[in-house]
Image (tube, rainbow, N blue to C red):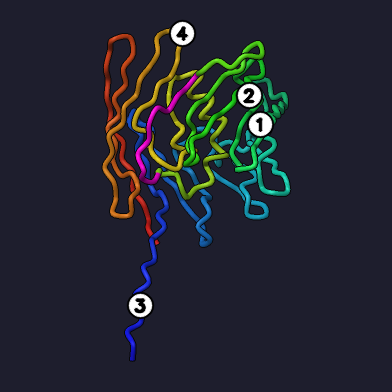
Amino acid sequence: MKNKPVIETKKLCYLKDADHGHGVIYNLGYNTNNQLITFDGFPDFNKINYENSLPKKVYSSFDESYFITYEYDVKGNPTLINFLGKDSRDKPFEFKSKVYTNSKKQIERIDLTMPVFDNILVTTFEYDANNNIKKMYLVENGKNKLLLENLSFDDKKSPYLNTPLNNLMMYFTIFSATIGGENTTYFQNKNNATSTKIYNDSGDMTYTYKYEYTAEGYASKVKVVKKQNGKEESHDETYTYTCK
């Protein structure tokens, strides 16, 4: 009898806990189909509902009067993000943001309207060959203004790789870069950024990242160093997984 060849099966790892420092901690839960259904620790929503295997509605179990819905084309590409709820005077609101994708299923542009913005925030994206966000632009008066640039990446796996948060959190990635000068493109990227620059009127910010990895090649720890206006600060982040 010939020995049967040993077939190596690579484990898929699903992010379980993410500690992004500064008190930002997310706990992720999945159903039996490995679909992300709970995202505890994020203020906008912690529950995810699916329709035809695509995330359709997200909401907070603490306040179901506010929720976000997502619409898709026949190929499963997102076409619309809809923010629905009631304002402080109990008046209903609805903010629809158009989403444009390319042939690679990458989001190329979002016309973002949210309760926190007075005007439509038009944002465009460029990607590298590995499906990572390379550049994020704000479009002002018909011209691209560079907002965020991921200058380099490693060749390992991003913590959020096997979650649907790449599309669900794109509005937050835009918001956090625009308002807070934060780089949250880890929700969308396949690999891990090692150097990032955010262009800001009050002083450009540079971020550098040094990683440790799991045996399966996912980021497990990262030291983040931020520099702005001659000041430097750092924090650590940790990620744990369930691998199957």
Indicate the position of residue 204 as horizontal and vertical percent values.
40, 13
Q: Which residues are magenta?
A: 147-157
Indicate the position of residue 4 as horizontal and vertical percent values.
35, 82
Q: Earlier in the sequence, mark 3 or mark 2?
A: 3
Contact (Cβ within 8 Å) of mark 4 with mark 1: no
**Residue picked out by circle 2:** 114
- Label 3: state its secondary structure: loop
- Disc 4 crowd rating (10 Å Cα; few below 14, some 14-19, many 20+) is few
Give amino acid for label 3: Pro
Q: CA distance from mark 4 to mark 1?
A: 28 Å
Q: Nearer the viewer, mark 4 or mark 3?
A: 3
Give amino acid for label 2: Met
Residue drawn at (35%, 39%) of the image:
154
Indicate the position of residue 116 as horizontal and vertical percent values.
60, 19
Quadrant hosting residue 210? top left
Q: CA distance from mark 3 to mark 2?
A: 55 Å
